[in-house]
Amino acid sequence: MKIMGYRREDGRLGLRNKVIVIPSVHCANKVCENIAKQCQGSVYINHQHGCSQLEFDALQTRDVLIGHGTNANVFGVLIVGLGCEVIQAKIVAEKIKEATPYKKVEYLVIQECGGSKNTIDKGVKIVNDMLSASLKLQKSEGDFSDLILGTECGGSDSYSGLSANPALGSLSDFIIDQGGAVILAETTELIGCEAILAKRAKNNEIAQKVYEKILGYENLVKSFHSDIRGANPSPGNIAGGLSTIEEKSLGCVYKAGTRTLMDVIDYAKPVVSKGLTFMNTPGNDIEQLSAMVAGGANICVFTTGRGTPTGSAITPTIKMSSNTFCYNNMNDAIDVNAGDIIDGTRTKEEVRDELINLIIRISNGELVKAEINEQNDFSVWRLATTC
C-alpha cells in the first residue's frame, strides 16, 4: 500500500516538508512568531523553557527542540535565541545539523542582531529562502513501513476503551505488520496494566524496563505524598464515566494493538526500532505529543471521548472521537468518528480502514483539522523547579 512523501537523505520519509522557527528560550517566542507570520507556509512553536533550568531539565528541553528540528517532516529550521540563556541557539542548531547534515539549519541571536526588529528582518529573509528551496523538492513514493505512528488519547471517556482505542490498536497492528513503527506513551495511563504490557515484551530485559518505568512513575507521585486521583483520571475523565486510573489504563493500552513490544525508551528519545516502542511520558496531552514528535513520529492519531483541538506544528495529528456526540459537538476539530462502533453501524476494522485511507490522502496533501486550525501545540515535561 503506497503513500507519498519527501524522502530524506537518511532514508526517512516526511509526510510534510515544513520550515519551522524554534525559540531556544521563551524570551524569543514573540520574535519567532513574528518571523513565521511574515513567511507564508512556515510554522513556529512557543514554549516557556530554555533558561533558569537545572541541567537535567535543560537537557530534556534541548532534546525536544532538537527532535523537532530533526523530524522527517521538517525541511529547514531556524533557531532563535536571546543570547544569555541556558539553552543556546547555536548549540541547538549545531546538534540538529549534526544529526541531519542534509537539512537547512540556521540560527539567530537577538542580542547579537541588535534587537527584535533586526532579528525579525534577518529571520524573514532566512525562512523565505528556505521556503523557496523546499518548493523544489519533489515527492516520492513510499509505503506504510515508512511510518512512525504516535498514538495518544486525551479527554477520554467510558467509550474510549470500547471504540476509538481498539480501532487505533487495529491500525497499530496493521502498520507494524507492514514494517512500520508505533509509539505507545502516557506512562501514568498504563498504571495497573504493567503486567499486560510486560507480557508482550520481546525479552525479559524489555519487560523489566516496563515495570521500572510504570512503577517508578507511581512511586514518584507517592514520594511527593500526593494522590494521582483528580489529576488522572481528570475531572473530565470522571465526568465521562471513568472511575479509576486502572479502568482508564485498561482502555488506553488498547491503542498499542497486540504485537510484540520491541523497545522501551525515555522521554523524547529517537525511535530506533521497527514495531512497538513504549516511550516514558506523562499523560499530559501536549507534553506527550511533543515527545513523540521529537522521537520521530511523522503521523499521529489522537483519540478522545470529550473532545480536543490538539495538534502539532509539524506532524499531522488525526483526531478520532470515541462517540458520535463528541464528533458532532466538536466537528471542527475531529476527523474520524469511532462512535459508529458504539452505534453498531461499523466495526473497528472498518474504522481502521478509514484511518488507513485518510493517511494515504494526508500523504498526498490533504490537511487534517488540527492543521487547518493551525494548532501548533508544544510543551516539555519538566522534571524540577525553575532556579
Image: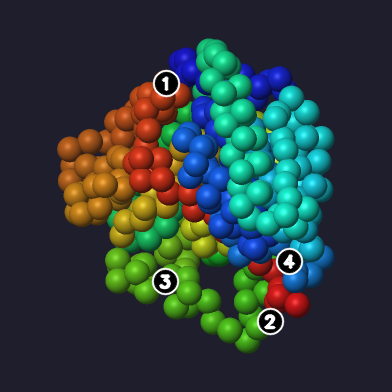
Of label 1 and label 2, which has the lower sequence position?
Answer: 2
Label 2: which residue? 223
Q: Relative to residue 27, is residue 266 depicted above or below? A: above
- Near mark 4 (Cα within 10 A), the count class, few <14, some 14-19 or many ≥20, is many
Residue at 43% over, 63% down: 248
Residue 209 shows in the view: no
- The span from disc 1 to disc 4 (Cα, nearest Å) is 40 Å
Label 1: which residue? 364
- Circle 3/circle 1 CB separation < 8 Å: no
The x, y position of residue 278, in whole percent, is 63, 48
Q: Amino acid at mark 4?
A: Cys
**Nearer the camera: disc 2 or disc 3:** 3
Q: Relative to residue 107, is residue 12 depicted above or below? A: above
Q: Amino acid at mark 2?
A: Ser
Q: Amino acid at mark 3?
A: Ser
Q: Relative to residue 325, is residue 191 depicted above or below? A: below
Q: Secondary structure at mark 1?
A: loop
Q: Relative to residue 134, is residue 91 depicted above or below? A: below
Residue 273 shows in the view: yes
Residue 234 circle label: 3
- Circle 1/circle 2 CB separation < 8 Å: no
- Near mark 1 (Cα within 10 A), the count class, few <14, some 14-19 or many ≥20, is some
**Nearer the camera: disc 4 or disc 3:** 4
Q: Secondary structure at mark 2?
A: helix
The x, y position of residue 43, in whole percent, is 52, 41
Tell me if 371 is positioned left or right of 50 in this view: left
Residue at 58% over, 84% down: 226
